[in-house]
């Protein structure tokens, strides 16, 4: 696990840091693939079972489809494990989403590049503060997906902090330097 201070640059200070609730993150990010995976896996199992009764090795063609179906159905487990390894950080300069573990990833976004801030599920115990879009180059009909600090406690407070930090960053960027 990464400490928040190691994610910051020299001279950068921490405004907020937190971790997602792994269960809520898994539900929010994995529900659609899970639901799609159920009939996909059921059909793959049915087809493979029917093919195994025929002559030849046709049942082997169903094995990759079973694997894909299992991956779809188990996607919430993947998101749960990723949620356990995720740290969110807000500084006066940028937001950071750091995921440690075997498939580590870090997304750092300067505050002046954030074009929107959206609060979701604020009435529940764990809400979302989304502030960037993931552009989908595949499956154009599925559209783009918004992401950010997902499944966090005190989402309303974090959204307020983020908006204030963006306003301060924009104000200091527009001031003339001498």
Image (spheres, rainbow, N blue to C red):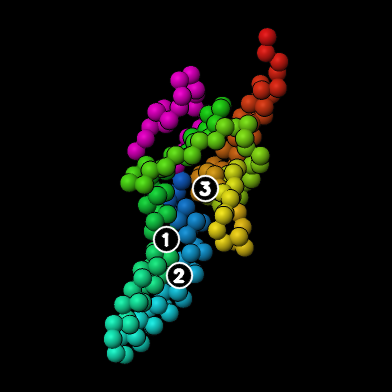
Identify residue for label 2.
37
Q: Residue at x 55, y 58 (%)?
A: 138
Q: Are marks 2 and 1 in contact (CB under 8 Å)?
A: yes
Q: CA distance from mark 2 to mark 1?
A: 9 Å
Relative height, residue 139 to residue 154 (above, below): below
Tell me the element at label 2: helix
Tell me the element at label 3: strand
**Image coordinates for residue 13, horizontal then vertical, percent:** 50, 23
Q: Is residue 26 left or right of residue 174?
A: left
**Image coordinates for residue 41, horizontal then vertical, percent:** 41, 74
Of pointers 1 and 3, the one earlier in the residue sequence: 1
Magenta span: predominant SS is loop
Q: Residue at x 45, y 74 (%)?
A: 40
The crowding category of the residue bearing disc 3, from other C-alpha atoms within 10 Å (few below 14, some 14 to 19, many at least 20), is many
Identify residue for label 3.
150
Q: Which region of the structure is painted magenta?
A: 1-19
**Image coordinates for residue 12, horizontal then vertical, percent:** 49, 22
């Amino acid at each position: 696990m990464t400490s928040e201070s190691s994610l910051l640059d020299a001279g950068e200070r921490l405004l907020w840091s937190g971790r997602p609730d792994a269960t809520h993150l898994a539900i929010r990010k994995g529900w659609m693939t899970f639901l799609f995976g159920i009939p996909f896996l059921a059909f793959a199992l049915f087809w493979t079972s029917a093919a195994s009764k025929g002559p030849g090795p046709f049942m082997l063609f169903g094995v990759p489809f079973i694997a894909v179906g299992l991956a779809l159905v188990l996607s919430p487990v993947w998101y749960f494990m990723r949620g356990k390894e995720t740290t969110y950080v807000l500084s006066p300069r940028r937001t950071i989403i750091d995921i440690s573990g075997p498939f580590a990833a870090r997304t750092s976004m300067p505050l002046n590049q954030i074009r929107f801030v959206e609060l979701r599920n604020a009435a529940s115990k764990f809400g979302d503060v989304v502030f960037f879009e993931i552009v989908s180059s595949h499956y154009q009909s599925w559209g783009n997906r918004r992401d950010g600090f997902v499944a966090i406690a005190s989402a309303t407070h974090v959204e307020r902090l983020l908006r204030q930090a963006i306003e301060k960053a924009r104000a200091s960027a527009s001031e003339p330097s001498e």
